[in-house]
Image (spheres, rainbow, N blue to C red):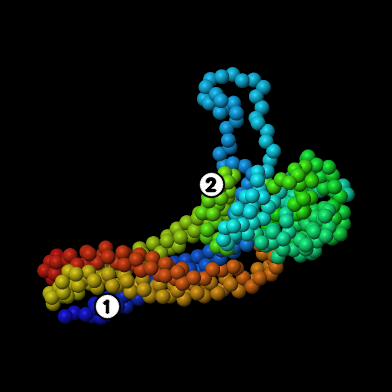
Amino acid sequence: MRTLGLFAGIALTHLRHRRRQTLVSVLGVAIGVGFSIAMAALMQGFQQFFIDRIINAAPHVVMYDDYRDPPAQPVSRVYGDATVEISGLKPLRERRGIKDARAAIAALETRPGIAVAPVLSGPLILSYGAKDLSISVIGIDPEREVRVTTLANDMVEGSLALLRTNPNGIVVGSGLMKKLGLRMGQQVTAASPTGSPISMKVVGRFETGLAAVDQGTAYVLLKKAQILQDQPDAINQIRVRLADVALASDTAKSIERQFGYRTESWEETNSNVLSIFVVQNSIMFSTVGAILLVAAFGIYNIISTVVYEKARDIAILKSMGFREGDVRLIFVLEGALVGLIGALAGWALGYLLTKLLGIIPLPGQGGMIRRPTSGFILYESFTHYLVSGGFAMVAAVAAGFIPARKAARLDPVEIIRGGV
């Protein structure tokens, strides 16, 4: 009974006979596998860092004071789709803010694994000297806010607690402070489109690493924001943080069903960014797949050439009792061996490339890279090795199977007679 070892030995003999071509094909597979591992680690490292940053810096779920499907205006409810002419129509004006916000907060806090914080956000103009800047002001309850965001950890000067001891205190972003030329303890004039100007004292500075936030956001006490916006006792957001972030989407849907207000999970809020990641991954895997496809053509070329050159050897094997399946297995094994050796070499190359990317010095550029780091942010996973190696093996076996079928169908009598 013939063994797999015998077939593998014959396959290795064929490959050694064409060392140069075999080496080129192995290198092609190794390069494809190695770059696949390194690129996957690089891409997923950045994506994981960005997602972690979003998850940690922002609330997981936010309820807003509007509706996903706005309610119909009274005239629409009365006349529906009837053909009527109405002049001087004005939409029904309602006081902004979440109705029965205290009851909603109390109801949410009864849910396990949930932290809740009320917020009132709105536009604000900060004036200092001759400079006026339009920003977004967020009124918060400091004790509650620290439970749903990492704002307290982003403080580089002062603290959120100083908002309690300074009712007219304001906490601004580093970029905003730089634009206005402010310093800690200085007074700045704040005015909203609906409220009166108020002189406020800078009691803190935060830095999130996100330029849009650091240059255009300030925090004040919730009561002070209500005065600035001329909305007493109003809030327009309820921020929620979950013990299990994976439940964010389901929790947002549940809250929206219960209270009716539009409620978004962090995935929905950042859906545009997450969709970009899908495109990035598609480009990455397409590029690596193209490399491995070229390597597969190299394997196909080698085995096709071996089949042509070893036609008489195939005839001899068949005359010795080798069946078509045996001959087919020999040449499929040749493709599998090239794929296996290439995958193993690619794993080593991928490991080295990943380590190299991890030690390349990167200067601090602001934003997410706030200080010099030892290298790129990488996400290493054994899954990358399995996927890339598996794809290489499938491509190699598929490339070897086509010429293997041709070899198995050769007629030994015709070959010996010189018919081939």
Q: Position of residue 243 (x, y in %)?
A: 57, 63
Of the pair 410 and 108, the residue shown nearer to us = 108
Q: Tell whether label 2 touches label 1 (CB within 8 Å).
A: no
Q: Position of residue 91 (x, y in %)?
A: 65, 30
* Viewport quadrant of the C terminus: bottom left
* Residue at 17 percent of width and 69 percent of height: 324
Callout in the foreground (1, 2):
2
Quadrant in the picture for residue 43:
bottom right
Query: Which residue is identified by label 2?
Result: 257
| Residue 46 visible from this viewpoint | no
* Residue at 69 percent of width and 58 percent of height: 145
Quadrant in the picture for residue 209:
bottom right
What amino acid is at disc 2? Answer: Arg
Give residue 8's mark: 1
| Residue 252 visible from this viewpoint | yes
CA neighbours of label 1 inside 10 A, class few (<14), some (14 to 19), many (20+): some
Task: Tell me if residue 246 comes above or below residue 340 in the rendering.
Answer: above
Q: Secondary structure at mark 1?
A: helix
Please identify the residue farthest to the top as the structure is shown. Answer: 85
* 243 left or right, relative to 191: left
* Residue at 27 percent of width and 69 percent of height: 332
What amino acid is at disc 1? Answer: Ala
* 203 left or right, relative to 145: right
Q: Position of residue 192 (x, y in %)?
A: 79, 43
CA neighbours of label 2 inside 10 A, class few (<14), some (14 to 19), many (20+): few
Give residue 79's mark: none
